Image: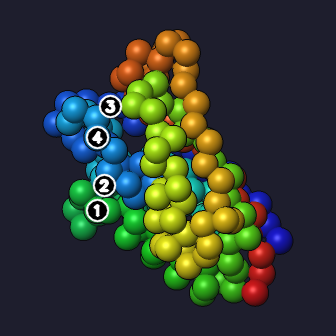
Amino acid sequence: MTIGFGFDSHRLVSGRRLIIGGVEIPNNNIGPIGHSDGDALIHAVIDAILGGLGLGDIGRHFPDSEDRWRDAASTSLLSIIRNMLIENSFEVEWIDSTVILEKPRLSPYIEEMRARIGSCLDIGAERINIKTKTAEGMGLIGSGEGIACFAVCLLKRI
């Protein structure tokens, strides 16, 4: 077994969709700046998996210098990572994650996020935990200008 840790953050701006965990969240057309869709939760999960595999980080595999990744759905990137897990004879045993976002409230969307991530990784949603927190008004996230996500995963050799 191996463990991986991931982190991602994005500034929020007007004119972007807010996608978290593969789910579009209504947010008055305010979403993350990013080369892809800016899904910070999936990006953190990808980094955690890549860390557990010892294969670097998301920027190494999906660099923002390549146009083919522009506006890419992060769920598609996560499906590519699933193939890397298989190629390296591993599977995800457990994912624990935290999304830090001042608003909107994410609790109505967590089960759909778990299902979407599970589907991309070909694992059950019961192996994925998603927690949500606010920054209690502190800093960039607390002022509603950003999002941050942390993820840890346990990988099992198959």
The residue pinned by badge 4 equals 26
Residue type, label 1: Ala
Looking at the picture, the colour scheme in use is: rainbow
Residue type, label 4: Pro
Residue type, label 3: Leu
Q: What element carries label 4?
A: loop
Mark 2 Cα within 10 Å, few/some/many (few <14, many 20+)?
many
Q: Distance between the residues labelled 2 and 4?
A: 18 Å
Q: How far apart are marks 1 and 3 (CA)?
A: 18 Å
34 above or below 52? above
Q: Where is residue 122 in the image (x, y as percent from the top left)?
A: 56, 79
Mark 1 Cα within 10 Å, few/some/many (few <14, many 20+)?
some
Of labels 4 and 3, earlier in sequence is 3
The residue pinned by badge 1 equals 72
Q: What element carries label 2?
A: loop
Q: How far apart are marks 3 and 2 (CA)?
A: 14 Å
Say whether residue 51 is visible.
no
Of labels 1 and 3, earlier in sequence is 3
89 above or below 133? below
Measuring 36% from the left and 23% from the top, which residue is drawn there?
145
Q: In this view, does 106 lie to the left or right of 27?
A: right
Q: Which of marks 1 and 4 is in front?
A: 4
Q: What's the mark number on residue 83? A: none
Q: Is residue 69 left or right of residue 78?
A: left
Measuring 50% from the left and 12% from the top, which residue is drawn there?
137
The residue pinned by badge 3 equals 12
